[in-house]
Amino acid sequence: MKKYISIILLGLSIPNFYAQQITIDEPLRLSVDNITGTARFRAMSGAFGALGGDLSAITQNPAGSVFFNNNFGTITASNYNSKNIARYFGTTTRDNDSSLDLNQIGAVFIFKDASGASDWKKISLAINYENTSNFDNSTFIAGTNPYNSIGNYFVDIAQGIELDYLTNYYYEQLPFDMQQAYLGYDTYIFEADSDSPTNTSYSTNIPIGGNYYQENSSVTSGYSGKLTTNFATAYKDILMLGVNLNFHFVDIRRSFSIYESNNNPLYDDRPTISSLRFDNNINTLGNGFSFNIGAIVKPTDYLRVGLSYESPTWYRLTDDATQGVSTRVVNNNVESTFASYQPTIVYEPYKIQTPDRWTGSLAFIYQKKGLISLDVSRKDYSTTRIKPKNEYIGLNSYMSNVLNDAIEVRLGGEYKIKQVSLRAGYRFDQSPYKVDRAFGDLTGYSGGLGYTFGENRIDLAYTYEHRNMNQALISSGMNDPARISRYNNNVTLSYSVNF
């Protein structure tokens, strides 16, 4: 009993550091839009805000479901391929990732007023599921850093933490910052400047001199998905109104391994780290909710004008993490290996609120043979928030300062030749940052075709996207990011049927 009481009292004395580490990358991963869904939708770069008539189009403007003439269903599969080219201190590396996914399924049900007694001519009910993001991605970064060691992360985070916390606690008893310091101290990356148990100052055991060879191998898998329930109605075939209720699902699995070695002169008076490896496995599970409202006006047979609003998505997420560090240490000309691999920690749930979005749309339709459609959307990423607010005041303030309004433009066209439809699209998505080097603008192109036979249709699409960004090897202690050029190439196939 005395043992448990002492542990509780010890725990009450721990300073209020963050329970876990969340960076700006986590909310942006769930906030930045991706074009997914049916092949027709993707072939036209998602420019469907004023068009409707597609299961994925209702995610852009919920009023679009009322343009179906009959009950209609679609199922879609996609092949995702991402290529990352990393440049780090003059060294260029490449990595590729490919996956096949059943990413969309949905149906819409149409109810028409045949009596003519009401000006509300049609009602549509739809349900659609699609993966909003496929997170399968791999990067490999390598190069020789002439300035900074990865060990700075552990040394910097330890400053100000009393030595007593690193020697008398178990890893799982500590908050996140202390856990990181514990890993560094337990593997001799740093040591206290004095033997006092209340010491709060530490010095690195990694030799100074630069030229640290470093690698970062990271793999991400998983998805975010959205189940949409939709209602729409048409007034006199001129005004279409719709609403969506969206239920979101998140399953993200990340692992990264950071390695460093050096050949710098050894210390004479203390151990010297010749190499280290830092391994992390982080899983994020959760769910969320959002809604859409939208309207489409059809003043003539050849012109449609749309306006839609998408609310913030309110996510509730839970992370678990498994960490470990191993080092090679030279002391008095004797080389030893030390490792500190710790149990999985399940952290307290947290919430992310993504920015809302407004979209204005315009579409021109030519005699049922061809069309051209334009969507322009606006998001204010500076309104992104992580809760509880009192635990993430610094990060929320940082996002307010560095993030900005962003404009997305989607342009698409389609031309029909008898049973064949030819499609193409263009997309520009502005960086959410005020200074876009950290996460650059996205440029995308798309194309595809469709073939109608009887009550059925098959569609094929190809999309290409490119974005440049910075990727840090580690979250703090170094200001030396790698420059990543990411290329996404996706092939999508859909099968649709009227019923």
Image (tube, rainbow, N blue to C red):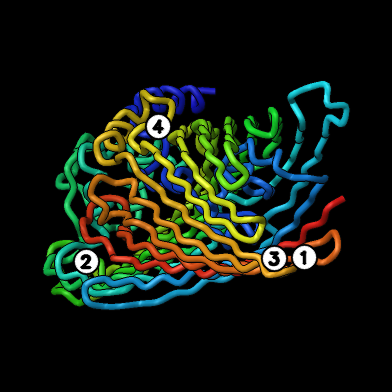
Closer to viewer: mark 2 or mark 3? 3
Split into 4 quadrants, where in the image is the N terminus?
top right
Residue wearing tag 4: 385
Of pointers 2 and 4, the one earlier in the residue sequence: 2
- Looking at numbered disc 3 in the image, what kind of residue is underneath it? Asp
Q: Secondary structure at mark 2?
A: strand
Closer to viewer: mark 2 or mark 4? 4
Residue wearing tag 3: 459
Mark linked to residue 272: 2
- Looking at numbered disc 4 in the image, what kind of residue is underneath it? Arg
Disc 3 to disc 4, C-alpha distance: 39 Å
Task: Determine the residue positioned at 34% across, 56% down.
Answer: 441
Q: Secondary structure at mark 1?
A: strand
Of pointers 2 and 3, the one earlier in the residue sequence: 2
Task: Determine the residue positioned at 22% across, 47% down.
Answer: 156
Q: Position of residue 339 (x, y in %)?
A: 41, 61
Mark linked to residue 307: none
Of pointers 3 and 4, the one earlier in the residue sequence: 4
Q: Secondary structure at mark 3?
A: strand
Q: Position of residue 448 (x, y in %)?
A: 60, 68
Mark linked to residue 452: 1
How packed mark 3 is, by other alpha carbons closer than 10 Å (few <14, some 14-19, many 20 or more), is many
367 on left or right of 347: right
